[in-house]
Amino acid sequence: MRTGIALAFVLQSIVFANVDALYKPCAGCHGVEGEKVANGVSKIINQMSKEEFIASLEGYKNGTYGGNLKALMRGQVMRLSKEDIEALATKITH
Ligand code: HEC
């Protein structure tokens, strides 16, 4: 039991370290805290709800969401897993 808790703790730290690395390429366009309007067109992503954030990234992946620059976002999210997207949403949205 004890080991289980310690292991969960370690895994959580790895996920947290990882999400910063995952968000790094995004910061150039969306701002370090998701506070910018990327390329003059995107929503301010830290003002989106967690659900909206996840739905938009899933939508870019499967081609069901986006505006004129959706191809650009598609390239950013294709490599992300469901877990990655969830972790990014938790980091950026409130
Ligand atoms: C090269 C600039 C650029 C990078 C890098 C980038 N984005 Fe975007 N992002 C945009 C643009 C532009 C849009 C709006 C695209 C559209 O739908 O026309 C957008 C849209 C979004 C949206 C939906 C907001 C809306 O306007 O509907 C989310 C959420 C998002 N990006 C998250 C991310 C995440 C997370 C990453 C990193 C994995 C990332 N972006 C990387 C430019 C970028």
Image (tube, helix red, strand yellow):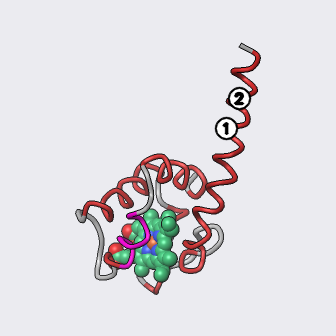
Asked if disc 2 and disc 1 are in contact, CB closer than 8 Å, the reply is yes
The quadrant in which the N terminus is found is top right
Residue 43 shows in the view: no
Q: Position of residue 34 (x, y in %)?
A: 58, 68
- Name the quadrant where ligand 1 sits: bottom left
Q: Position of residue 8 (x, y in %)?
A: 67, 30
Q: CA distance from mark 2 to mark 1?
A: 6 Å
**Label annotation for residue 7:** 2
User: Where 42 falls versus 13 (above or below)?
Assistant: below
Report the residue that reaches farthest toward the top.
1
Magenta-drawn segment: 72-78
Q: Quadrant of residue 79?
A: bottom left
Q: Is residue 73 magenta?
A: yes
Horizontally, is 25 left or right of 82 in the view?
right
Q: Position of residue 18 (x, y in %)?
A: 64, 54
Label 2 element class: helix
The residue that disc 1 covers is: 11
Q: Main secondary structure of the magenta part?
A: helix
Horizontally, is 47 left or right of 53 in the view?
right
Q: Position of residue 59 (x, y in %)?
A: 30, 60
Residue 34 shows in the view: yes
